[in-house]
Image (cartoon, grey):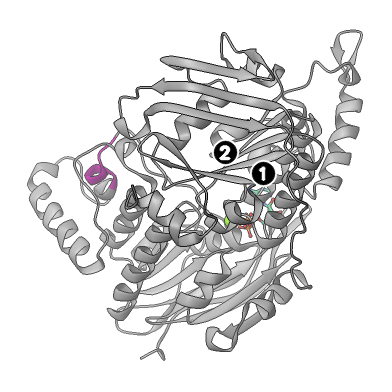
Amino acid sequence: MQTQTVLSLNGLTKSFGTVSAVKDVSLDLKQGEVLALLGENGAGKTTLMNMLFGHYLPDQGSVEVSTVDDQMSPLPLGDPQAAITAGIGMVHQHFTLAENLTAFDNITLGAEPIFSFKRHKAKAEKKINDLMQKSGLVAPLDVPISALTVGERQRIEILKALYREARILVLDEPTAVLTPQEADTLFENIRSMTAAGLSVIFISHKLREVLAFSNRIIVLRHGEKVGELATKAADEGKITKLMVGTEASENKRSPAKPGAPVLTLESLCVACPSRRNSLKNVNLCVHASEIVGIAGISGNGQSTLAELVSGMTKPDSGKIILDGAEIEANEPRTMIEAGVGRIPEDRHKDGIIGHMSVAENLVLENCEDPAFQQRSILDWSAIRRRAEALCAQYDVRGPGIDAPAKLLSGGNIQKLILARVFESNPRLILANQPTRGLDMGAASSVAERLLSARENGAGVLLISEDLDELLSLSDRILVMRDGALTETASFERNAIGLLMAGDAA
Ligand SMILES: Nc1ncnc2c1ncn2[C@@H]1O[C@H](COP(=O)(O)OP(=O)(O)OP(=O)(O)O)[C@@H](O)[C@H]1O
Ligand SMILES: [Mg+2]
């Protein structure tokens, strides 16, 4: 069945200024195939797919897509509408749904004429229900996107592409925001869709799922295609070597020597309108030189906990104590001044100011530092020197320190945030999904930095959906479920999984 070619990329090349993002990449996709696209952060994966989808105009190269009668025909480049018409659907690394519109409106928006819409509504509903049935991608349709979980939002993104009759589906890091269970379900759904003829390209940093669910693997490094192999013939070692040129190394860590409490939460309660995110009588203590992991399925209150500790939400009752002093007005600035370093979950929204330069983002929280001031005026040459040094030290790659931070790739944005946090020598590091979407090299450097911060006396509150990450880094683990925390004595995957699902009392 996997013989008919449905898509060919031929010699695609794209530079941004001096950054050569994609160099002469060619690939074919067969019908019903799942092709995994791998590579380090900044390797050019998203850029390549954006050229396919018409968001970027390639400097060189061409794309051919099969037509309904199985002929290959050239795709007009730089034209998203042409890509959609040709049957290409893309689900972006960062969701693009309109938050205040319903799921139904998001799916049909732009695909149906607005004026005669009422007449189309019943037909559209039937089409979506059929798609849900066939693909197994189920989500509520009549509520605003903002009320949906990340997993549901993603299903809506995919349904939106399928609604436009996509025959080729590109998923840019589809599981980066999903729990392991949601990811498994997604891949089951993908399987049933490919069995029905859909062809899929998916980008991922998670080798385990790539090995389990793809048919073929293509690896990019520094914009070039450096390897292509059948998944049957691949293993983690081989792929890692292709991606980074060396095999990954294990983190080494010493036993915990916890010091005095740095963060204490006493009987904290927060009632949220969406009950999902309320906190119910949360007690927690993070000591100096200790990493405390919070496990749990997303939407059980973790984001509220993170907002409290970063000063973005106020508790209804209870106390927050930092370094022995109770926090009165918890606002972001108070928390930063009290020594909290934040690695936020949504790095685009809460981590950077996109239109400001890389250098500006690096000093954002400490521009009052005398090192960056000269007679009360910002000393730009000192700031730029510092930014250059930090980018080198934290391996932030991209179009340079003067470029807007939003132009960095996902992984490089995270490295920028890490540089800012670790350089401020925080007492407490709030790390919320710190390695989500990061390649193995970048993820292990985050882990190393968290461990060395712990070594240097910081307390770390690590919120993560990645159990492997929690198990390898945490000194203690608490499970958050339905707004409440339970400490687990066991470091065993299954036991923690049961607490997460609420199956154990
Ligand atoms: N619009 C742009 N302007 C300037 N540089 C860009 C732009 N888009 C991407 N780049 C640069 O091109 C390179 C490739 O980026 P791309 O987003 O394709 O990487 P990626 O492989 O998807 O990485 P990640 O795994 O982190 O998502 C990076 O160095 C990035 O900074
Ligand atoms: Mg990307």
Left/right placement of residue 39 relative to residue 188 reads: right
- Tell me which label, 1 or 2, sits earlier in the chain: 2
Q: Main secondary structure of the magenta part?
A: helix
Disc 1 under 8 Å from ligand 1? The reply is yes
Residue 288 in percent (x, y) is at 72, 32
Amino acid identity at mark 2? His
Q: Nearer the viewer, residue 88 or 32?
A: 32
Q: Which picture quadrant has residue 13?
A: bottom right
Amino acid identity at mark 1? Ile
- The answer to whether mark 1 and mark 2 are in CB contact below 8 A is yes
Residue 355 in percent (x, y) is at 64, 32
Q: Could you classify mark 2 by the number of other residues whose Cα lies within 10 Å: few (under 14), some (14-19), or many (20 or more)?
A: some
Element carrying mark 2: helix
In the displayed structure, 121 sits above or below 285; it is below
Per the rendered image, the range of residues in magenta is: 101-106
Left/right placement of residue 32 relative to residue 12 reads: left
Residue 458 in percent (x, y) is at 74, 34
Q: Is residue 102 magenta?
A: yes
Alpha carbon separation for disc pair 1 and 2 = 8 Å
The mark found on residue 413 in the picture is: 1
Q: Is residue 33 magenta?
A: no
Residue designated by label 2: 348
